[in-house]
Image (tube, coloured by chain):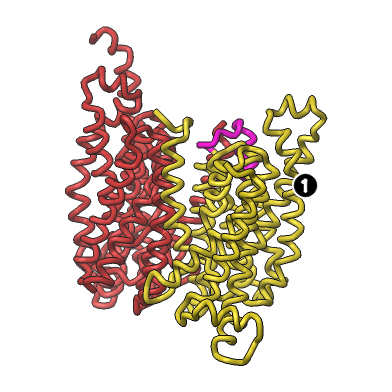
Amino acid sequence: MTAVLDPVVPVVRSGMRRSFVVSAVLVAAIVVLGVVALGIGAIYVAPLDVVRTLLGNGSRITNYAVLDLRLPRVLIAVVVGAALGMSGAVFQSLSRNPLGSPDIIGFNYGAATGGLLVIMVIGGSPGAVSAGALVGGLVTALLVYLLAWQRGVLGIRLVLTGIGISAILQAVNFYLIVNAGVADVARATVWLTGSLNNLGWTQLWPAAIALVVLVPALLFGVRWLEMLEMGDEVAQGLGVPVERARMYLLFTGAAACAVATAAAGPIAFVALVAPQLAKRLTRSYGAGLLPAAWMGALLVLAADFTTQRIGGTLPVGVATGALGGVYLAWLLWKRP
Amino acid sequence: MPSRGTGLVLVLVALGFVMLLSLAVGARSIPFSTVLDVLASRDGSDSAFVVWELRIPRTLIGVAVGAALGVAGALMQALTNNPLADPGLLGVNAGASAAAALSISVLGLTDLRAFVWFAFLGAALAGTVLYVIAGRSGASPVRLALAGAAVTAALTGFTQAVVLLDQNALDQMRFWTVGALERANMGTLTDVTPFLVVGLVLAFLLARPLNVLALGEEVGRSLGANLGRTQLLTLIAVTLLAGAATAAVGPLVFVGLVVPHMVRAITGPDQRWVVAYCAVLAPALLLLADVLGRVMAREEIDVGVVTALLGGPVFLLLLRRDKAVRA
């Protein structure tokens, strides 16, 4: 057995090294962009002063601008982007289709439905709303899984079922927002198009903690994911409990997506684009969870930075949507 | 089993009944007898006002839009030989909606007769993009549906952005996200009717060529069918029908998907009958959905929400039956 596997090892090693380098470059880019984003705004802070402030040596004004106003937003962008990137990597690998990402198959809309229901029925605190979004995302995942189940779940059927569910959920969300009169339109629109406006430390902590729990859970599932990509029968032969593994991955992936949606609403296309871009950079065939996470974080951060510069209160989902649309057109054109 | 002709008469009767229902039911319910009285003589009573000024335009626009979307769906399914094709699901309506919303927001257009052209442009672009994608890959139903969903997602996001940028207009423009019949009036109807008529006539003329096409490209060619012309004209008809319908009431999903399937179960694959039935059954079902939306909750539910709620499950059911996606 080892003899058969041996030739593969160097390839895997070089792939891992490349993926490590890509991750490092992406993290560096995130840090640089983060420092720039922390400095720019109504109160300008020079990059070096930003670093000084972050290290605890800031003046009152820079403390206020950098730490109180901008840092939570930047960190939320990173957390949300990372969660979406990983979620997308898991689902694209599961469905063996780049279009099988949570934004196309409706999990983020399900999470939005959950959040909206809590706002309207219970009128709950931000924490309760986040919990509602989490439950909404997971219930949607379960529903899609059960409806797509037909002597096992086939990737393509999972995607198409998700599309149907997603259309229904978008209609439901729309109804909830318009007819039930969510008083604050700005707050309601977050649930239509993801946005980082008006978010602070209170939204960051739950998302960050959830991500800390989810990352090991997702990494634990990666070994299954890579074997499932080779086909159900091969995976079964390698000792993977196929349906159970799929269920586990589906739920952890959906949870990651729901965490992001709970914090910032359904931000479109990051989950679709991030894993694809990461995969092109690392040139690896696996799920590439961590590079996808960094790529997602960088994308959301960059998109939010751009929309803030262009439109002020324009939701970040607009920029990711435009970006994703262009990428999508290219993807569809390119694939035979 | 009754012949297809008798069946069509039955469906027409059903449409007439649903139209009456649509005139009677709403926030203010009017008994059938009163509706008939008021229809016969416009007597200046409150009921007459409600029926003539509010419900007749709404009902007629529902009929027009329903027929357009049902027939557009039948055309798309025949053209792409794809059971999952629907102008709503494949992004044609979303394209029309995005272009119309953009023209309203950027160019400040307010007249339907002006922005309907942008709706056509958007519908044509979305339709062409999809057709090119499908054409390149041998038009697998699954692939087309995937591409359509992706295009829809992108365009819907775009429309929402346009609407959101104009916070004050959020309420007036919300129907660009989910379709609604209630804001339509007689002006809307007269504005879009010419386009719909042309589209419907085209659809009937295309029935025979599409029947030939259904035999396969090679057989069709050997029978003398002009493949390219048929495809182009079908795309034009779909653009006219879906574009005008969307300009009038916003993007509606699933109407064009579900109705042709129901119809083919009755008529078989002959496109001439499919189009005729779709033109009658689709409006009946759309109006029924609208009526349901009026009575389901205290506040009215937009018809776009109802069609998604009713049509979504049918789509899921079709998926379970479709061989292409079965394990």
- Name the residue located 57 percent from the left edge and 91 percent from the top edge: B45
Name the spot of residue B102 as percent of width and height, x first: 60, 67
Q: Is the magenta stretch mostly helix, strand or loop?
A: helix
Q: Does the magenta stretch include residue A187?
A: no
- Tell me the red chain: A
| Residue B28 visible in the current orientation | yes
For label 1, the crowd category at 10 Å Cα-Cα, with few meaning under 14, some 14 to 19 and many 20 or more, is some
The answer to whether A245 is drawn above or below residue A178 in the figure is: above
Q: Colour of chain B?
A: yellow
Name the spot of residue A33 as percent of width and height, x first: 38, 56
Question: From the image, which quarter does the C terminus of chain A lie in?
Answer: top right
The residue at the far bottom in this view is B44
Q: Which of B57 and A113 is in front in this view?
A: B57
Residue A260 picture quarter: bottom left
Residue A95 picture quarter: top left
| Residue A277 visible in the current orientation | no
Q: Does the magenta stretch include residue B134?
A: yes
The residue at the far top in this view is A3
Q: What element carries label 1?
A: helix
Name the spot of residue A99 as percent of width and height, x first: 45, 41
Q: Which of A235 and A203 is in front in this view?
A: A235
- Name the residue located 19 percent from the left edge and 53 percent from the top edge: A210
The answer to whether B86 is drawn above or below residue B306 in the figure is: above
Name the spot of residue A87 as percent of width and height, x first: 32, 45
Which chain letter matches label 1? B
Q: Give the range drawn in magenta.
A: B129-143
Q: Which of A46 and A316 is in front in this view?
A: A316
Q: Residue at label 1?
A: B205
Q: Which of B144 and B63 is in front in this view?
A: B63
- Name the residue located 39 percent from the left edge and 46 percent from the top edge: A162
Q: Name the side, left or right, on which A134 lies relative to B16.
A: left
